Image (spheres, rainbow, N blue to C red):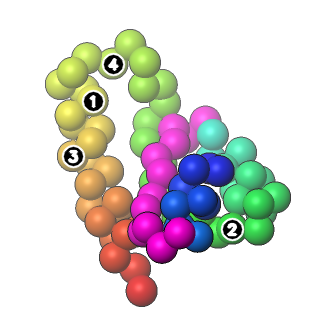
Amino acid sequence: MHDIADLERRGVVGVFLCTTVFDEAAVTQSEALGFPAPYVLVPHPVQDRTDAELRDMADAAYPQVVAAVTRG
């Protein structure tokens, strides 16, 4: 969260991904930093996923990531 906030303040458009378990934490941290960080949720957990499962997760999240970084 700190990294994406720092990059955005430097003019680098970005978005971070977090798993569904950390959704509430992402909102809380965003509010604490005073930065409405754009993020995309992915299924939890990530560890122990096969390469194919990770590719599927990335493919599923891709449209949301593109939407988040191109939002005006």
Q: Amino acid at mark 1?
A: Leu
Give the labeled residue for mark 2.
35
At horizontal 26% and vertical 54% (from top left) the residue drawn is 62
Q: The magenta stretch spans which residues?
A: 10-21
At horizontal 71% and vertical 45% (from top left) the residue drawn is 25
N-term mark: 1 or 4:
4
Category of crowding for the residue at label 2, using alpha-carbon neighbours closer than 10 angstroms: few (below 14), some (14–19), many (at least 20): some
N-term mark: 4 or 3:
4
Q: Amino acid at mark 4?
A: Arg
Kind of element beneath mark 1: helix
Give the labeled residue for mark 1.
54
Residue 16 x %, y %: 48, 51
Kind of element beneath mark 3: helix
Category of crowding for the residue at label 1, using alpha-carbon neighbours closer than 10 angstroms: few (below 14), some (14–19), many (at least 20): some
Q: Kindly check if marks 2 and 4 are in contact, taking CB atoms under 8 A apart as contact.
A: no
Give the labeled residue for mark 3.
59
Residue 43 x %, y %: 44, 36
- CA gap, disc 2 and disc 4: 31 Å
Kind of element beneath mark 2: loop
